[in-house]
Structures are given as C-alpha cells and as structure tokens.
Image (spheres, coloured by chain):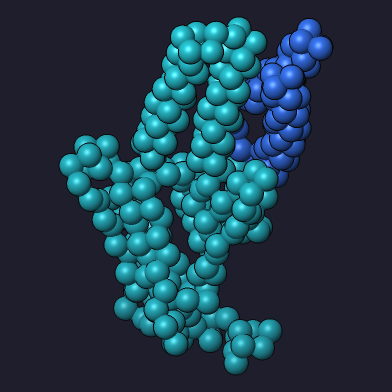
C-alpha cells in the first residue's frame, strides 16, 4: 500500500531527492459521504416521482426534476471522488508535503523542510474497532523548533503502523546523514581512527 | 403561464449546470496533468456524461416551454 503513486510526485522532487512515502487517505473515508449522497439522491427521486405522479400529475416536471436530482447527485459523487484522489501526503528525503487540490476550489500545499527542523516524535494512532479492522489511522510527526513545537499529521492513511515505522527509520537515517562525523574508522585497519579533516582537507572550516 | 416560467427557470438552471460541469472537467484535466494523477475510469466517464445530460435537460426544458407556448 505504501508506494510511490505512478511517478505522481516526480514534478515535485529535486535532483537527488527521493520519495519515501506517497499516500492518500484510506478509501473508507469515502464510504459515508458517498452513502449519504446515494441515500438522499434516492429519497429525492422517490419524493419527486411520488409528487408528480400522485399530487400534481405532470410528465415534463417529473422528467426534469428527476434529471436535476440525478445530475446533482452525480456531481456530488464525482466531486467527492476527485477531492479524495487529489489530496495526498508525500514524504521525500528533503520535505514533507500535504497537497490538496480541489478543482474550482482550494489549492493548498502544506510543506515542512526536513533540513530546517528536528524530528522528535513519530506517533501512530488507530482509533476504534473499525479502524483497527481496516488498518486505518493517523501518523503524527512532531518537530521541535527553537520557538515552538509543530506537528504534521498524516490523517486516515492506510497501514499507519507500517508507515510510522518506515518514517521513523528514514527520518532517523536522514538525521544521521545530516551530521558530519569528525572521526573515521578505516575498513583495512579498524583499530586506527583518523580525523575526517585529514581525509577531506578541502572541507576544512567549511571552505571549499 | 406558471409552468412556462418554471420551464424557463429550469432551462437556465440546466444551462448553468452545463457550464459548471464543463469548467469542472477542464479544471480536473488541468490538475490531472499537473500532478500526474490517474483518475478512475468511472469518474472520467461521469464527468463527460454529466455535461451531455445537463445539456440534454436544458434542451428538453426549452422544448417543453415551446410546446406549452
């Protein structure tokens, strides 16, 4: 389930940046909105049919009212599916992004640059029996900033345990990659420890 | 007389709905290309069907109006 979605994020990544996770919300979040749209649509269809057959017998109004209900229900159905499809979380080796592009609505991108913050916690939360059964939950990534704490939540994603573990590992690796080691152990002579500046003198004092 | 006004109102309602569906489909296509997202075939088909159905409904309402007049 945790996979890069058909090169979807390729325009969003820089050279040398790789995608760790690209997920959407779980399909189950669609169930209740679509169920209510269907229920209200069917009820309105029956209501208008009953009205224009029993009380005000009129074929043109029956046809047009049923068409209007069908079109509105279909529009809401399509909008719900498109909104779900265009809302995604992308975690790369450089940043965490929440993309939300509602057609003819809100276009929002919420991003955190990982080299500017320090990740302190990766929390997984699964609430309730249904979410346990469907393996759906939230992954909260907490960043410790000098001034305040900020949490980035990947809400209602599938396989939150797997995603949380993967993110914790990857963010830990990135943290270690970010820090420069001063001492280096050679493979040929592991008992000897060499100072990094001797191996890479051009990096001395940060001047290339 | 009263039904004539309702038919005209319905015509404009379906006309606006057709325009909205066209704009929506265009915007979805733009976002799809921008984000390289694949949409389910059901959604793409419904987007097209909605445009034609709303146009047909506008046509039907104006035909009913003409019959009444």
Q: Which of these two is toward me, A174 or A201?
A: A174
Q: Indicate the quadrant where residue B6 lies.
A: top right
Q: Quadrant of the C terminus of chain A?
A: bottom right
Q: Position of residue B45 (x, y in %)?
A: 63, 20
Q: Position of residue B21 (x, y in %)?
A: 70, 31
Q: Residue at x 46, y 44 (%)?
A: A24
Q: Residue at x 37, y 35 (%)?
A: A32
Q: Residue at x 55, y 64 (%)?
A: A111
Q: Position of residue A149 (x, y in %)?
A: 39, 78
Q: Residue furthest bottom?
A: A205
Q: Residue furthest front?
A: B1
Q: Indicate the quadrant where residue A181 lies.
A: bottom left
In the rendered structure, the answer to whether residue A73 lies left or right of residue A189 reads right
Q: Which of these two is toward me, A134 or B25?
A: B25
Q: Quadrant of the N terminus of chain A?
A: top left
Classify A81 as above or below A110. above
- Regarding residue B45, the answer to whether it shows in the image is no
- Chain drawn in blue: B
Q: Residue furthest left?
A: A129
**Which shade of the palette goes to chain A?**
cyan
Classify B59 as above or below A78. above
Q: Residue at x 21, y 42 (%)?
A: A132
Classify A136 as above or below A109. above
In the rendered structure, the answer to whether residue B8 lies left or right of residue A175 reads right
Classify B20 as above or below B68. below
Q: Which of these two is toward me, A76 or A186?
A: A76
In the rendered structure, the answer to whether residue B36 lies left or right of residue B68 reads left
In the rendered structure, the answer to whether residue A35 lies left or right of residue A94 reads left
Q: Position of residue A197 (x, y in %)?
A: 53, 86
- Regarding residue A112, the answer to whether it shows in the image is yes
């Amino acid at each position: 389930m945790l996979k890069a979605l058909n090169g979807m994020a390729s325009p969003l990544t820089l050279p040398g940046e790789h995608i760790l996770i690209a997920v959407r919300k779980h399909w189950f979040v669609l169930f209740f909105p679509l169920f209510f749209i269907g229920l209200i649509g069917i009820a309105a269809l029956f209501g208008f049919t009953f009205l224009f057959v029993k009380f005000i017998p009129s074929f043109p109004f029956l046809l047009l009212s049923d068409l209007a209900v069908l079109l509105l229900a279909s529009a809401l159905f399509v909008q719900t599916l498109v909104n779900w499809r265009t809302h995604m979380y992308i975690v790369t080796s450089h940043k965490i992004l929440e993309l939300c592009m509602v057609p003819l609505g809100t276009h929002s991108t919420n991003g955190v640059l990982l080299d500017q913050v320090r990740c302190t916690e990766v929390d997984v939360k699964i609430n309730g029996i249904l979410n346990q059964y469907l393996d759906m939950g939230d992954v909260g990534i907490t960043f410790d900033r000098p001034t305040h704490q900020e949490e980035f939540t990947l809400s209602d994603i599938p396989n939150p345990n797997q995603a949380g573990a993967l993110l914790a590992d990857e963010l830990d690796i990135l943290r270690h990659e970010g820090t420069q080691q001063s001492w280096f152990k050679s493979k040929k002579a592991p008992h000897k420890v060499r100072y990094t500046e001797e191996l890479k003198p051009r990096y001395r004092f940060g001047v290339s | 007389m009263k039904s004539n006004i309702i038919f005209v109102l319905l015509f404009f309602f379906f006309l606006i709905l057709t325009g909205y569906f066209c704009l929506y489909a265009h915007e979805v296509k733009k976002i799809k290309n921008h984000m390289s997202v694949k949409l389910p075939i059901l959604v793409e088909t419904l987007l097209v069907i909605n445009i034609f159905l709303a146009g047909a409904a506008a046509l039907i309402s104006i035909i009913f109006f003409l019959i009444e007049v």
